[in-house]
Image (tube, rainbow, N blue to C red):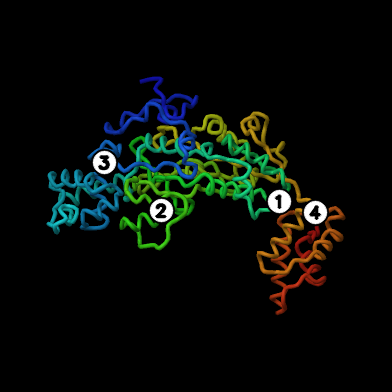
Amino acid sequence: MQGQKSIVEEVFGSAAARQQPSSAAPVSSPAPEATPPHPTDWLARGNAHAAPAPRLPTNLPDTGLTLGFLADMALKVLYVQGSLLGQEIAHQIRLPFPLIDEALRFLKDQRCLEASGGDVMGRISYRFGLTELGRLRARETFEQCRYVGPAPVTMEQYVAQCRRQTVTGTQCTPASLKTAFEGFIIRPDLLDDLGPAVCSGRSIFVYGPPGNGKTVIAKGLGRYLNMSGGEMYVPYAIQAENTIITIFDPVLHQTADDAELARRGMLPKVTQTSPGLSSNPDGLSDLRWRRVKRPVVITGGELNLDMLELQHHKNGNFYNAPLHIKANGGVFLIDDFGRQLVSPRDLLNRWIVPLEERVDYLTLTTGRKFSVPFEQLVIFSTNLNPKDLVDDAFLRRIRYKIRVDPPEKDIFTQIFTSTCQQRGVASSPEAVAYLYEHYYDKGRIPRSSDPRDLLDLAQAMCRFHGRAMAWDEETLRYATGRLFHELQS
């Protein structure tokens, strides 16, 4: 039906272009909430530390999946792993056994499964295996899509959860931001620039000479989101346009629910729970989602346009979500902007619609497009001249521009002292005076990274000569001579 809103537009109220809805969507998929809660409603209810957990599905329509889809998931699990107990199949698919049992009964009626009786626990303790017919059907299903693991959530469910845990929904105050940046030495008024940007959830353009803490800003904001924004939920995978797209990435998503999963028999036993959310002792959370700390995804010169699109596994026939989608709910830092292999103009053009509409459009190999939430704090960081990189149209879409200048002498001294303390080395005011007398007062611009780099050089030289680290004149001459060496033409 022409003019129908996409799922993301329905929930987020985006003004992005309309698209044709998929006719292949499962008929049992639950519709989005008629009146979705505002992103900050859960804060008003007094929960300033955690997004609400997706609730455990109690029936098949709650999952948003069809019986046939679950049956195929069970077939693939048994095809890959061999015969399993009913409970083990449910653990693999991450759904309650009564729902999985519907699929198992269906497959048994189709003569695809055989079951051997278990103990008094009932069918959950039965051992299920494939028949010859079941093995044939499982092989065909596996060749169509080789994704084997937790069942996906629907796009409707993913959009609704993204809405509940937006960056804009976190409560940012001067006190909370200052606490998050504790231990980072920055100019005093920098937090006054960052705070409103976080409250708005809009993108940030950070520029200035290299080595002065632009990456530190991203890490500090990530720490703030972890401390004040609470933990959030990421699905293992989503189902979109009849296709599976994996979202959860153990490299980028720091899990916070290991103790809960261990208690429920899905991970090895652990002895400590993570701070933040409760461990859901009632067991009512949907295990197709992982509870994680808000992600901080950093990419640099290696970024190209292909990395911002779906990654198709040709042999497996499923997709891996791009980096910025995995960063939803957290921070996405594009470091060294302007030094990518792709031109800045092409990269910026790729971001214009997502930055404006909070929605991105991804394309399947079939050419079919669909919309996904674009809900993260995007930071562009560069040490190049911004006027050489971006035009006014793009700068208008980036509401907050923050220049990070070289440190003043008092800030530099604090950084030098802190760096020495972290390495267990005695600080030296004389060393700072030497640097200014011989270099900085003579025109060389100090960098916040200089103390770390000088200490690396000094410690390496002292280890080589077998003597204790000390900021004497010989050590200073060696370290500065290497760090500040001017290359000869």
Q: Tag on residue 58?
A: 3
Q: Amino acid at mark 4?
A: Lys
Dividing the picture into quarters, in which one does residue 464 lie?
bottom right
Question: What's the residue type where badge 3 is placed?
Answer: Thr
Q: Is residue 360 something that shows in the picture?
A: no
Residue 311 in the image: state x and y as whole percent: 44, 44
Disc number placed over residue 409 in the picture, else none: 4
Q: Find residue 384 and report its image quarter.
A: top right
Dot 2 or dot 4, earlier in sequence: 2
Determine the CA span between mark 3 and mark 2. Answer: 21 Å
Q: Secondary structure at mark 4?
A: helix
Q: Position of residue 306 (x, y in %)?
A: 51, 43
| Residue designated by label 2 | 257
The amino acid marked with disc number 2 is: Asp
Judge from the rendering whether residue 53 lies leftward or rightward of residue 49; answer left or right. Answer: left
Residue located 40% across and 27% down the image: 35
Query: Is label 3 or label 1 in front?
Result: 3
Between discs 3 and 1, the one toward the N terminus: 3
Mark 2 or 1 closer to N-term? Answer: 1
Q: Are marks 3 and 2 in contact (CB under 8 Å)?
A: no
Say if 384 sits above or below 466 in the image.
above
Which comes sooner in the sequence, label 1 or label 4?
1
